[in-house]
Amino acid sequence: MSRSTEPAELFHLLRTGDRSALAQAITLVESTLPSEQGRAEDLLERCLPSAQRSLRIGITGPPGVGKSTLIDAFGMLLIEQGHRVAVLAVDPSSQQSGGSILGDKTRMERLGAEPGAFIRPTASRGSLGGLARRTREAMVLCEAAGYDRILIETVGVGQSELDVDHLTDLNVLLTLPGAGDELQGIKRGIMESADLIVVTKCDGTNADRARTALLDLQHAVQLLPARAHGGRAEVLTCSALTGEGLDPLLDRIGLLHERFRTSGHLASRRAAQEGWWMHRTVEEGLLQAFRTHPKVIEALPALGAEVEAGRISPFKAARQLLELFRTAS
C-alpha cells in the first residue's frame, strides 16, 4: 500500500519508530527529483531538533577486511545492551553503469533480524569520499526515529575515505593481519583520521600474524600527528567469528565517547562538521546548477569533442564553460 510522503505524516511515523516510514523517508531525501526536494528539506528541518543524540561511529577499511561481518557481531552486542542500532552501509557503485552490489544487508543476517536494528545499504554513485551523497541526511532521519547508535560503513577505497571524519564522532579503521603488508594498503591520511585501529580475523592460523600486525601498527601510530582531541589511535585485535576482542572494542569506544563528551571535544567536532556540510552543500548546489544550465548543456558537446580531438586544452574548455555559466546566470 502506498504511504504518504507528506513531511508532517512521515515525521510522525518516524517518531513512533516505524521502520517502513524510515526507509521511505530516506528514499525521499535521496531523490534527485526537483519536485521532491522541497518535501525532503521540510522533513529534515522537522527532524533536526531530534537529532544529535546518538553516538556516530565510522567503520572503514580495505575491501575484504570483514567490515560487514564485524558490524553484524558488534551490532548484536549493542542490541544486547539495550541500544537501537542503525547501519548505513555505503556500497560501491559502478562508474560505468551506476549499479551497485548492495549486498551488505545479506551479510548482516543476525542484526538484520533484530527489531531494534535498521540496515540501509546505499549506493555511493561514484562519490569520491566513500560516502553516499545523502548519508548525512539519512543519519539525521535515523536519529529522529530513535536510533542511538549509528554505524556508518564506508566503501573502503583508500585515501578517499576521509569524508567519514566529517560525519562521525569517532572512527574505527579495520585492517587484516599480514606481517607488515597491511601497512601497504593503508594511506597515511586514513590512519591519521582513525581513533581506533582494529586488526580483524585474528583467529586460527591468523593469530600469530595478528600479533605481529598489532605491534607494527602500534609503532606506526606513534609516528603520526596527534588527533584534534590530543591522542593517537589505539590498536586492538578482534575476531568477529569467535567474538574474541569484541567486548574490549565496545569498552574502548564507550570510554573514548565519554572522554570526548566531557572534554568538550565532541561538541566542537560536531560544530565544525556542521560548517563543513554547509560548504559541501553549497558546492553540490553550484555543481548541479552548472550541469543543468541551458547554455552549458548547449556548449558542452562541441567543446567536449574539441578537447577529445586535441584542438583545445581541457583547461581552456573548462574556463569557457565557467564563463558561459557566470555571464548567463
Image (spheres, grey):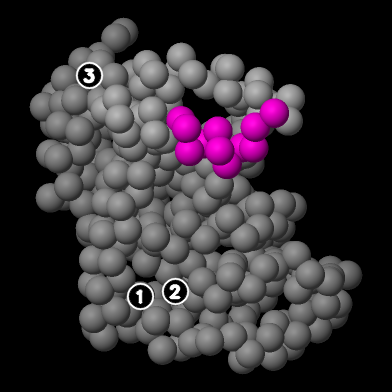
Q: Dot 1: what SS?
A: helix
Task: Please report the residue visible at 11 percent of the width from the left and 27 percent of the height from the top.
Answer: 8
The image's mark for residue 5 is: 3
The residue sitting at the top extreme is: 1
Residue 123 at x, y = what percent? 54, 34
Which residue is at 41% across, 89% downward? Answer: 230
Circle 1: is it few (<14), some (14-19), or many (20+) Cα within 10 Å? some
Residue 235 shows up from this direction = yes
Query: Residue 126, relative to residue 228: is it above or below?
Result: above
Asked which quadrant contains residue 43, the reply is top left
Label 1 to label 2: alpha-carbon separation: 6 Å
Please indicate whether residue 171 sits to the left or right of residue 143 in the image.
Answer: right
Magenta part of the chain: 311-321
Local secondary structure at mark 2: helix
- Residue at coordinates 88% horizontally, 70% vertically from top-left? 205
Q: Earlier in the sequence, mark 1 or mark 3?
A: 3
Query: Is 13 on the left-hand or right-hand side of 257?
Result: left
For residue 269, above or below residue 227:
above
User: Disc 2 vs disc 3: which is toward the camera?
Assistant: 3
Please name the amino acid that badge 2 sits on. Answer: Ile
Label 3 amino acid?
Answer: Thr
Q: 76 or 7: nearer the eye?
A: 7
Q: Which residue is mark 1?
A: 257
Disc 1 and disc 2 in contact, CB within 8 angstroms: yes
Q: Residue furthest right?
A: 205
Q: Position of residue 23 (x, y in %)?
A: 36, 29
192 drawn magenta:
no
| Amino acid on which disc 1 is placed | His
Q: Which residue is mark 2?
A: 253
